[in-house]
Image (cartoon, grey):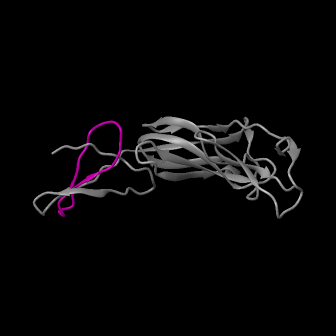
Amino acid sequence: MRCNLIALLSLFVFVSPLHAGDGQELIFQSSFEGEEACVVFDGDGDTIDVPAVHISGDLTLNGEDFPFSQYDDAIFSLRDRVTGDIFALGNSHDQQYSVNVVAGHYDVMYSVQSPGDNVPRNIGAAIMENVALLSDQTLNINVVAYMISGDFLHNGAPFPATEFDDGVVFLDSPQAGRIKVGETKF
């Protein structure tokens, strides 16, 4: 019996029942892209063989180390290309990561955790897309960031300088995620 195995990335593997056969066996399916495999569990101790790889690397901001501060940091994660599930990879203040993951194709995601003066303020930015993690490897992750600045205007004039008549300005994009640019009151 064969079926496509779709792997979910995590330090553990979550599989859900696809269908039950004659009441004695359950077939499990997940989203691994690659070789075919089938997991049959009949209660007699069948083995589940999950294709896992070890990845590690440096986390840098414009080619330099991220700040070594829990008050100016971000979370890196992997997003499964099939399921959309997101799994923690590491924190920018650690400046490195080392994890075991289920083999597959992923997007590397970036989200600010504690915005300080240095880290980009993006939430949910896809900084690398469709990364093949099919064997043990070093994957250095560099975030390229730019400073933006300017004035908020309403019909060519400044917004009212009051906290009771204000707005919040965001930039949104599928790849860059959401960025809170500022508030109109100040």
Residue 18 in the figure: left or right of residue 55:
left
- In the displayed structure, 165 sits above or below 81; it is below
Residue located 69% across and 40% down the image: 60
Residue 58 in the figure: left or right of residue 70:
left
Occupied quadrant, residue 148? top right
Q: Which quarter shows the C terminus?
A: bottom right
- In the displayed structure, 25 sits above or below 39; it is below
Q: Is residue 29 magenta?
A: yes
Residue located 35% across and 38% down the image: 33
Please count the marks in the image: 0
Residue 174 in the figure: left or right of residue 21:
right
Find residue 1 and report its horizontal and vertical position in percent: 15, 45
In the current view of this chain or complex, which residue is farthest to the left?
Answer: 22
Q: Is residue 96 magenta?
A: no
Q: Residue 129 versus residue 36: which sits nearer the camera? A: 129
Find residue 115 and report its horizontal and vertical position in percent: 75, 54
Q: Residue 105 versus residue 59: which sits nearer the camera? A: 105
Residue located 85% across and 51% down the image: 159
Find residue 119 and report its horizontal and vertical position in percent: 74, 47
Residue located 44% across and 42% down the image: 81
- In the displayed structure, 86 sits above or below 60; it is below
- In the displayed structure, 164 sits above or below 115; it is below
In the current view of this chain or complex, which residue is farthest to the front?
Answer: 155
Q: Residue 101 versus residue 150: which sits nearer the camera? A: 150
Occupied quadrant, residue 177? top right
Find residue 12 and report its horizontal and vertical position in percent: 41, 57
Q: Main secondary structure of the magenta part?
A: loop
The magenta region covers 27-46
